[in-house]
């Protein structure tokens, strides 16, 4: 039962570097999302996808890029890392929307530090 | 628009005593509501969800929550705290009409359990 798998778990970047956070799910879910978690703010939506080839922006999309070429994978790219992107990143997937009562499954998180 | 307020950022209880974590929400529609738990350096695990069926929702590990529309509340309770319940808890709301499967998180409540 892999569920939602994120890699890497920990990463340190220098300002200006780029990197990709990987996310894969094995539940054949159409919906996938990326959130970032900052102290006292809960999780905020960065980007989401409602199926292969379809992505859209969430609440805090600036500085991030996504693509969805397959149902299983939803990578998050940091184009030019900034210290403000130091955060914990969570990938999530679901069969349908949470608003319709579907359970959202989360990965274990990726801790990113930008120095 | 949807929003969530967790009324306490920290709650401390003694082992064996009741737990109450308070959550108020705002939504223009009939939302789905969730409680998630996050143990240190771990991902988020679903405790329970409300999806317009029974207003008293039972979850895992002895937790339950009651949806009160008149009070716009969805408080989480447990009759007897266990040391393993020490974690951060998030109340989450999702409107059925939001296109992006956006979940709105409260700021979190850290539960501490004293022996």
Image: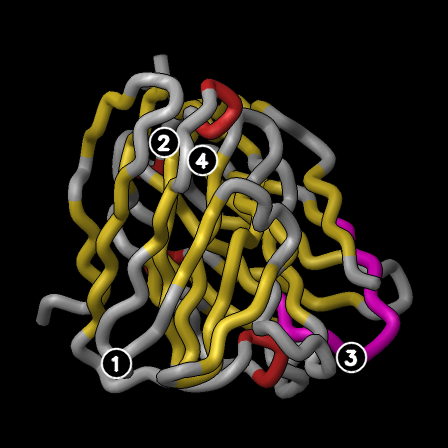
Looking at marks 4 and 3 on the same chain, the residue that comes earlier in the sequence is marked by 3
B84 with respect to B60 (left or right): left
Magenta span: B24-33
Tell me the quadrant of the picture where the N terminus of chain A can be found: bottom left
Mark 3 — on which chain does it sit?
B
Quadrant hosting residue B87: top left
Mark 2 — on which chain does it sit?
B
Q: SS at mark 1? A: loop
> Which residue, given by chain and number where applicable, does mark 3 sit on?
B30
- Residue at mark 2 to residue at mark 3: CA–CA distance: 31 Å
A42 with respect to B39 (left or right): right
> Which residue, given by chain and number where applicable, does mark 4 sit on?
B88
Mark 1 — on which chain does it sit?
A
Tell me residue B14's x, y (percent). Answer: 43, 23
Q: SS at mark 4? A: strand
Local crowd size for mark 2, using a 10 Å CA cut-off: few (<14), some (14–19), many (≥20) = many
B20 with respect to A95 (left or right): right
Residue B56 visible somewhere in the drawing: yes
């Amino acid at each position: 039962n892999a569920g939602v798998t994120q890699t890497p778990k920990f990463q340190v970047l220098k300002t200006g570097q780029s990197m990709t956070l990987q996310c894969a799910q094995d539940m054949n879910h159409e919906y996938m999302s990326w959130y970032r978690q900052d102290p006292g703010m809960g999780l905020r939506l960065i980007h989401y996808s409602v199926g292969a080839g379809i992505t859209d922006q969430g609440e805090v999309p600036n500085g991030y890029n996504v693509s969805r070429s397959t149902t299983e994978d939803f990578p998050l790219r940091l184009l030019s890392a900034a210290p403000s992107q130091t955060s914990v990143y969570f990938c999530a997937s679901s069969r349908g929307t949470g608003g319709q009562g579907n359970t959202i499954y989360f990965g274990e998180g990726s801790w990113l530090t930008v120095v | 628009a949807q929003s969530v307020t967790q009324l306490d950022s920290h709650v401390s209880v003694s082992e064996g005593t009741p737990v109450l974590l308070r959550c108020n929400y705002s939504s223009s529609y009939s939302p789905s509501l969730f409680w998630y738990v996050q143990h240190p350096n771990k991902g988020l695990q679903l405790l329970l969800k409300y999806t317009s069926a029974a207003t008293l929702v039972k979850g895992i590990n002895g937790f339950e929550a009651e949806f009160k529309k008149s009070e716009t509340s969805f408080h989480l309770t447990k009759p007897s705290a266990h040391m393993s319940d020490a974690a951060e808890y998030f109340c989450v709301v999702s409107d059925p009409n939001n296109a992006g499967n956006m979940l709105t998180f409260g700021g979190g409540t850290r539960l501490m359990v004293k022996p």
